[in-house]
């Protein structure tokens, strides 16, 4: 914060001047400050809602991934279910065939039992002759052979009937056991299929409920964000209107015939000061109006750092005062502090140049610099000085 070169002594009236920026702060600062507080609060709420929406979107994305994975798993389970159902149908088909076979064998055993019983009855009732009787009663050798052959056939038939009956009974027993096994397997497969279906249904319902919850939360947050953005738009429009009104009032005060206005009973010369160009943002007009208010005040080392209201300002103090009037700074900075203030590089409307020893700014093409006091009696100058060795910073958006 290097002092400016010594300048001629100011008139006594100016030595006790109170900056007109104080009047601007009193007339517009309170209302704009309230608006800015509301805007900041709404911006914080909007940021929180955006964070919440992003978090819900991540949940939805994760749920979508889970649903895709679940769908793939469901497809695999459905494939297994189809295979189990095919196997179940095969078992049921085998079960029907086994039942048919069982009925057939039971009928066959019944028939064999009846045939054996009929032969036994016939043998008992017919007084079946023995081999000696057949030989004695035979009428010749041919008749004897025929009688013996008949007896042998009857014996074989009875033996076959007995064998068939035993075989049928064994087959019936085996088929009955196989039938029981198939029935048990059928019940197990049916239970497994039902359990898998229940698991699939529960998994799908849980994932869908989770995604619906996240979608609902994001929708509610988006609705709130829309409301907050609407309030922000209204507040910013009102702030811009108030700033424009303040700029017009300041221009009206500085265009009087005497080129002066009164603040706190003291006359302050504002004639010939910088006017904001057409289309300039409200913040730029406020910075220029505040700069006009202190443009002719003397250079005072450390002025404007203990309080924004002072009888004189140093380089960084005057820059701090003008920026604070537009709500771009909350407390005074020294020249070193301005090296890291705001955004890097020159701005469209406002650029602050700072290093360890000095700070000045350029607003809408006008240089606002305590050094300019020695050049033309005001801190404003249309000439540009070298910026070598300075860091350029600017307020966001300006």
Image: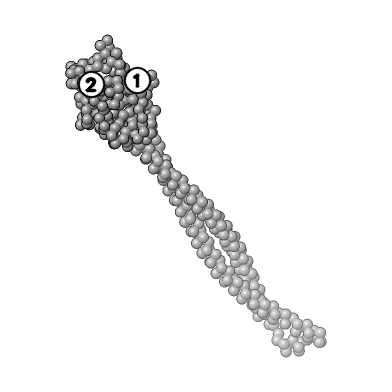
Q: Secondary structure at mark 1?
A: loop
Toward the top, the furthest residue is 257
Q: Is 136 or 352 nearer to us in this picture?
A: 352
Task: Tell me if residue 365 comes above or below residue 203 in the rendering.
Answer: above
Task: Tell me if residue 368 comes above or below residue 136 in the rendering.
Answer: above
Residue 31 can be seen in this image: no
Instruction: Identify the residue position indicated by label 1 in the image.
Output: 276
Residue 79 can be seen in this image: yes
At label 2, counting other C-alpha atoms closer than 10 Å, the crowd grade (few under 14, some 14-19, many 20 or more) is: few
Residue 224 placement, left or right of 170: left
Task: Tell me if residue 224 comes above or below residue 259 in the rendering.
Answer: below
The spot of residue 108 in percent (x, y) is 64, 69
Task: Tell me if residue 227 comes above or below residue 278 in the rendering.
Answer: below
Rendered residue at 24%/16% (across/down):
269
Residue 27 placement, left or right of 159: left
The spot of residue 320 in percent (x, y) is 27, 29
Q: Which mark's residue is nearer the viewer, 2 or 1?
A: 2
Locate the N terminus by quadrant.
Answer: top left
Rendered residue at 29%/26% (across/down):
371
Residue 55, quarter of picture: top left
Q: Secondary structure at mark 2?
A: loop
Rendered residue at 33%/25% (across/down):
367
Q: CA distance from mark 2 to mark 1?
A: 29 Å
Q: Are dots 2 and 1 in contact, CB under 8 Å?
A: no
The spot of residue 10 in percent (x, y) is 21, 20
Rendered residue at 52%/54% (across/down):
76
Residue 89, quarter of picture: bottom right
At label 1, counting other C-alpha atoms closer than 10 Å, the crowd grade (few under 14, some 14-19, many 20 or more) is: many
Locate the C terminus by quadrant.
Answer: top left
Instruction: Identify the residue position indicated by label 2 in the image.
Output: 8
Of label 2 and label 1, which has the lower sequence position? 2
């Amino acid at each position: 914060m290097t002092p400016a070169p010594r300048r001629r002594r100011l008139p006594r009236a100016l030595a006790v001047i109170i900056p007109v920026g104080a009047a601007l702060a009193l007339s517009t600062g309170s209302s704009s400050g309230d608006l800015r507080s509301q805007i900041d609060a709404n911006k914080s709420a909007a940021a929180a809602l955006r964070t919440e929406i992003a978090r819900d979107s991540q949940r939805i994305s994760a749920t979508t991934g889970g649903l895709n994975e679940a769908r793939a798993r469901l497809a695999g389970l459905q494939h297994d279910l189809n295979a189990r159902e095919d196997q179940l149908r095969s078992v049921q088909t085998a079960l029907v065939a086994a039942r048919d076979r069982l009925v057939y064998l039971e009928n066959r055993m019944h028939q064999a039992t009846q045939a054996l019983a009929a032969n036994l009855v016939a043998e008992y009732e017919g007084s079946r002759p023995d081999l000696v009787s057949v030989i004695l009663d035979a009428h010749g050798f041919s008749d004897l052979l025929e009688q013996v052959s008949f007896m042998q056939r009857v014996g074989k038939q009875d033996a076959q009937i007995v064998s068939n009956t035993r075989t049928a009974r064994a087959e019936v027993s085996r088929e009955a056991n196989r039938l029981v096994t198939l029935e048990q397997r059928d019940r197990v497969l049916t239970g497994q299929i039902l359990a898998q279906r229940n698991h699939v249904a529960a998994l799908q319902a849980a994932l869908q409920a989770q995604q619906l919850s996240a979608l609902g939360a994001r929708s509610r947050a988006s609705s709130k964000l829309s409301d907050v953005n609407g309030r922000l738009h209204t507040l910013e429009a009102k702030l811009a209107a108030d700033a424009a009104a303040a700029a017009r009032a300041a221009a009206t005060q500085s265009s009087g015939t005497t080129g002066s206005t009164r603040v706190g009973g003291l006359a302050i010369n504002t004639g010939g000061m910088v006017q904001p160009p057409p289309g300039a943002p409200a913040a730029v007009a406020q910075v220029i109006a505040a700069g006009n208010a202190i443009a002719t005040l003397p250079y005072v080392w450390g002025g404007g750092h203990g309080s924004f209201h002072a009888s004189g300002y140093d380089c960084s103090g005057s820059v701090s005062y003008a920026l604070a009037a537009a709500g771009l700074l909350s407390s005074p900075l020294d020249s070193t502090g301005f090296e890291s203030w705001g955004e890097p590089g020159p701005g469209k409307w406002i650029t602050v140049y700072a290093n360890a020893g000095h700070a000045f700014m350029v607003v809408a093409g006008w240089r606002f610099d305590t050094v300019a006091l020695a050049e033309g009696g005001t801190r404003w100058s249309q000439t540009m000085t070298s910026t070598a060795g300075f860091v350029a910073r600017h307020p966001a958006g300006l």
